[in-house]
Image (spheres, rainbow, N blue to C red):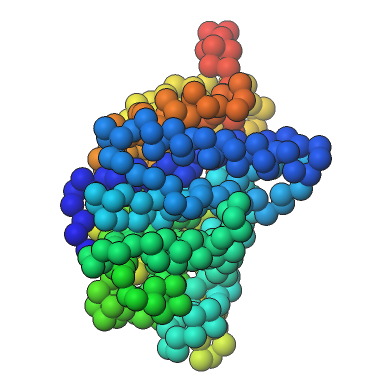
Amino acid sequence: MNITPQLLQQIYSLSFSVNSASGLSWSQTDCKSGMIEMQNYVTKVAHDVLTETTTIIGNWKAIWGPIVYANNATSQSVHADNTMGMYYNETENTIVIAIAGTNINSPYGWLAEDFSVHKSVSWELITGVPSSGNISTGTHTGLNILLNMTDKATDSLLTALKNFLNTQTSSEKLQIAVAGHSLGGALSPTLAMYLVDTKSEWDTANKTTIGAFPTAGPTPGDEGFASYYEKQIKAKNIYYLSQLNALDIVPHAWEKGNLAKIPTIYDQYIKQPNDANPAEVLTGTLATVAALNALSSKNIAGIPVNRYKQISPSKTLQGKFNHDIDDKISKKLKYIRLVLPLALGKYAVYLRNLVRFAAQAGTQHVTEYYKLLNIEEFMNAYKTILENNKPTTEITPEPYEQAVKSIAKIDLQKIDEAAMQLAQENH
């Protein structure tokens, strides 16, 4: 594949563009109107992205999707659990299949896909390829959802891809780049390998080359799957570029050695109380729960073990600790001890540090990648498009605020900093 720095920026921009429904929900009383509105919103944002950012990412057109999936599509309030779209650029001779990350509003995405790693599914059962390892049940669930999505013409991704290839007459091989961030960072390499292993079904004339471009992805499968994948990269000439921020906790899941690094990942910046033993008791507990969840198989003695392994190679990017957000959090929670029951005041520092940890985790997992992937210009334009199409007057939380609410169960927007200051003045 011919992947220039310019094309790489375009791939990552499209990858992030399918996250437009993140943090949003649609009400419905008729079991369908909210789903229709959500799909229309995602379609409209995609249209605006493709027409209003051509000076940044060039000329792309949607050839399928983006399609939104909701696990509970008939509930009174619906949100996107998965989103995927397929785009084509004639000049670049490239198709991008973009897969959305986890929606902060999606318990299904968190529990059924991201965190469902306690069991695994044989890749052979999925593709028929023997000795190919296993993927987590969560990855398998997500892959099934993607493969079963259909557009208005009831075409699946593979059907649309096959139909599109039938219209191509060029002798030059068409590049297919499968990209995604976060949950999409686990699903994109998995879908790419599925395309490789089933290529004879949808690309009978062998017109394509395939690449995977995951960012911030948790581990999709076990050591057997990683080994199989790495062999296929060479054997099938797969272009594989996985990029991870060293300060992002998400790619540390689910490989056991990486999980162990999570509790202390920000220790250089977030100092624990001198008498704390162990120092990182709260973040350590979170990592321990994750480690227990990842015991997906048993060894020969019947003892539960973690066999998850990241696919190699991956490129580690060095993110920068965001002191501005950390200072904002520290200031907002500076006096919380004064409004807590006296017996709980001693725990305030631990809570504050957990919130600082969560805020940094959200920042490093999302916004820091804009700089690291060199897509800040696109993301600024994308943010404007989202604001112009916003379906609600609700304020959409920033990634760090969403992470704090998810991990520490605190809504930072509801904390009255002025009232906290007043408590200090009257103390």
Residue shown at the point (21%, 56%) measured from the top left? 3
Classify 145 as above or below 77: below
Observer-nearest of 368 and 140: 140
Q: Position of residue 281 (x, y in %)?
A: 50, 50
Judge from the rendering whether residue 251 lies leftward or rightward of residue 306; answer left or right. left
Classify 334 as above or below 17: above
The answer to whether one can see residue 300 in this image is yes
Classify 234 as above or below 21: below
Residue shown at the point (67%, 54%) measured from the top left? 71
Q: Position of residue 131 (x, y in %)?
A: 43, 88
Classify 177 as above or below 322: below
Q: Quadrant of residue 319?
A: top left
Q: Quadrant of the C terminus?
A: top right
Residue shown at the point (71%, 49%) measured from the top left? 73
Observer-nearest of 303 and 6: 6
Q: Position of residue 164 (x, y in %)?
A: 42, 61
Residue shown at the point (49%, 35%) measured from the top left? 45
Q: Quadrant of residue 206?
A: bottom left
Observer-nearest of 87 and 31: 87
Q: Position of residue 266 (x, y in %)?
A: 36, 44
Q: Quadrant of residue 416?
A: top right
